[in-house]
Amino acid sequence: MTSTTNLAVQRRERLASALRASGFDVLIVYGNAWQGDYLRYATDFGLLEGHGLALVAADGEVLFLLESAVEAERAHAEAAGVGVRWVADAPAAALAELRRRGDPVLAGAPFKLLPRKLLRSGIAIADGTALVDRLLMHKLPLELEAIRSATRLADDAYRVFIHAATEGTPQYGIVAEVEAFLRAHGSADNFMLIGSGGPDVRGMTPPSDRLLARGDLVTTELTPEVGGYYAQICRTLVVGKASDVQRRAFAVYHEALEAGIAAVRPGARASDVARAENEVFRKHDLGVYTTSEYTRVRGHGVGLFPDAKPHILEDVDVELVPGMTLVVHPNTYHPEAGYIVLGDTVIVTDRGAEVLTRTPRDLFEAG
């Protein structure tokens, strides 16, 4: 049995055990090509198009319902140990199967994405999102190994990014080189954003044809996948030599990242990590730039989804426990320099944060 197959079996056994402990007979799991982590946990299958439903029984049996003939054919080949059925209407097929099974006690996850046909059918479905979230957040040893591999690949890919970031290069040209490298090294997916410019740039976006100019800050979130698991690196470079303004601004982010990582420990809350980062900005009279007007989160979980729970915010009370994997990143706008990013992937351990990212926390100069 390969490690990938073994991990799929471990996940399904863990999910079935959690269902039994919670008193549920069947968990209805939904997924689509974007939000596919819940479904992948149950089926070990990553959707490329359309959507799907899985019925996970407390005895470990999994029935996977797919409306795409192509995806069903691929799932037959790739989703070992899972019953795959190609259907015209996955919610209707799920309801028919559940009625055939009598009156099982049901839960659904992620509950907010369940099809209306299921929710309006008259059958009772409890919200099982938190049950699955606990499993998604608290990684098995083989899951941690996959994230370690993805982090090593992210470090390597950022070196490609630096080399490609030359004056006159369009943003899409840099991303194309990174994507080519990642695909050649076995990464089937990479969530990536980029930004370039100065104080006019307030965030990152998918790549455009904007040309890099000397003096630009060039930012990226680079998030490759290995075996279904993502890891992220956030870094900033300057095309040419960094100015004193850029260096002074970057020093705040360096300090904030170190404070955030120092706050990662068992028993701490996601809010504690966010607060540690934000206090650095407040100390430098930049507290307004930690608000939702300028930034979304101060980090987040990573795993089977590139932007997973828990989100690192001051109002998120999720307790950190060993086995969680996070990206800590004080990414936000700076009024003098523009948008700056800096972030590492870490594992929560008994001793605190194990930092997986090996790329130096420098303001790189390139091009």
Image (tube, helix red, strand yellow):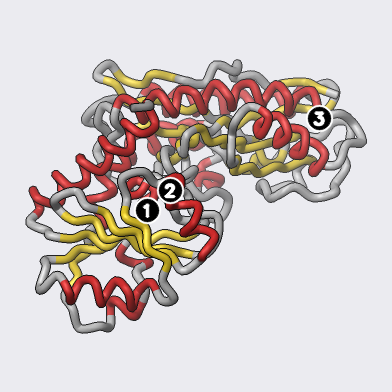
Q: Residue placed farthest to the right in the image?
A: 168
Which numbered disc covers residue 165? Answer: 3
For label 3, the crowd category at 10 Å Cα-Cα, with few meaning under 14, some 14 to 19 and many 20 or more, is many
Q: Amino acid at mark 2?
A: Phe
Closest to the observer, 284 or 152: 152
| Residue 269 at x, y percent in the picture | 28, 37
Q: Nearer the viewer, mark 1 or mark 2?
A: 2
Q: CA distance from mark 3 to mark 2?
A: 35 Å
Is residue 314 shown above or below 156?
below
Q: CA distance from mark 1 to mark 2?
A: 7 Å
Q: Are marks 1 and 2 in contact (CB under 8 Å)?
A: yes
Q: Earlier in the sequence, mark 3 or mark 2?
A: 2
SS under mark 1: helix
For label 1, the crowd category at 10 Å Cα-Cα, with few meaning under 14, some 14 to 19 and many 20 or more, is many
Q: Earlier in the sequence, mark 1 or mark 2?
A: 1
Residue that mark 2 sits on:
45
Q: Nearer the viewer, mark 1 or mark 3?
A: 1
Which numbered disc covers residue 103? Answer: none
Q: Are marks 3 and 2 in contact (CB under 8 Å)?
A: no
The quarter of the picture where residue 223 lies is top right
Is residue 227 shown above or below 40?
above
Q: Amino acid at mark 3?
A: Ala
